[in-house]
Amino acid sequence: MNISQWLPAMLLLPLALFAIGAGLALRVANRSLRRLSDAAQAWRPDRESAATPERGPHEARRAHMAFDAMQNRVAGCLAERTRVLAAIAHDLQTPITRMRLRADMTDDQAQRSKLQHDLDQMTVLVREALSYARTLHGVREDPRRIDLDALLDSLRCDYEDAGHTVSVVGQVGRPVGVLPLALRRIVTNLTDNALRFDKAVELTVQLDRQADIEICVLDRGPGIPESELDAVMQPFYRLDGAAHPGSAGSGLGLAIAKQLASSMGARLKLSNRPGGGLAARLSMPHCEQSQA
């Protein structure tokens, strides 16, 4: 074999080895970037996140380190904001109590009633602010298998005892895995919001085709403008009081419901009903591996 026959093969061999090495390096880099992308997609500011593995090329490891540092900074800022909000709400309870005692000592009945009404509103705002601060870091509760039909029926009975008309339509018919305390708070907040606009509220429950649980809170109130359906679930957002006379409140009930739903992996959506009224639809996965 002369040189003209084996020279091309000798020249192609380094190129082939280079191409194989470049392909392997690119694959490793892509795998590292994919892990970083998955971590970014899964990251939630209201949940503790594990550090992403720092593997791959130098630049990919630096990107992982920067992402972990960003998670820690955001978590720190959120924790600080939560502490400030909780501290302010807690410290306000003492002066509110003193003001309530002084209002009770006022001889003017009309003035006393006005002061007590204002203090009641302040108390509600402080209580809701504390609740919202607690929900910012997610749900501290383990899933359990419960009788969801019984839970909703107990809520209905509680509202009936308080003089409200709340009905439950539909049944799940079997135990399901949920976060019962968080779920009860969400449904209560949605029902309280609906009762501000309508005297009779309907709760519907069902399992959809994917075995996800769907609970709807329905009313026949004035509804919400389409442009504000998302905004009303933001903290302290209130609708125009003249157009929605029942909208007076802390502005945190729907925000707490949304935060709790997000923390438990559920979806909360508001929509206007045909013929008038609002539908608050909560869709959440059924936890098969829940504790008994």
Image: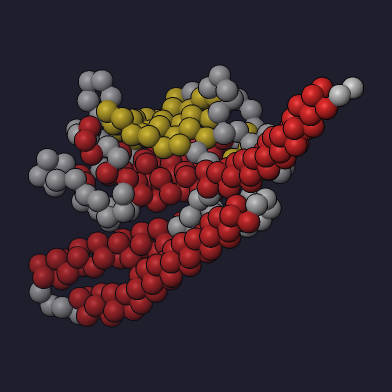
Residue found 49% across the figure and 60% down from its top = 70
Q: Position of residue 130 (x, y in %)?
A: 40, 64
Residue 167 relative to residue 21: left or right: left
Query: Residue lying furthest right in this view?
Result: 1
* Relative side of 206 to 231, left or right: right
Instruction: From the top left corner, tell me how far across and down residue 160 is, in percent.
Output: 39, 40
Q: Is residue 162 visible?
A: no
At x 47% / y 43%, what residue is drawn? 261
Please say if 173 is above or below 197: above
Q: Which residue occupies 71% across, 34% down?
A: 15
Residue 134 placement, left or right of 173: left
> For this rendering, which residue is in front, 226 or 36?
36
Residue 216: x and y in percent read 41, 30
Q: Residue 179 in the image: x percent, y percent?
A: 57, 45
User: Which image quarter: residue 96?
Assistant: bottom left
Q: Can the viewer see residue 12?
A: yes
The quadrant of the image that shows the N terminus is: top right
Classify the position of the C terminus by image quarter: top right
**Total marks drawn?**
0
- Residue 210 occupies which quadrant of the picture? top right
* Residue at (41% x, 37% y) in the render: 268
State how the image is colored: secondary structure
Residue 282 horizontal side relative to residue 63, left or right: left
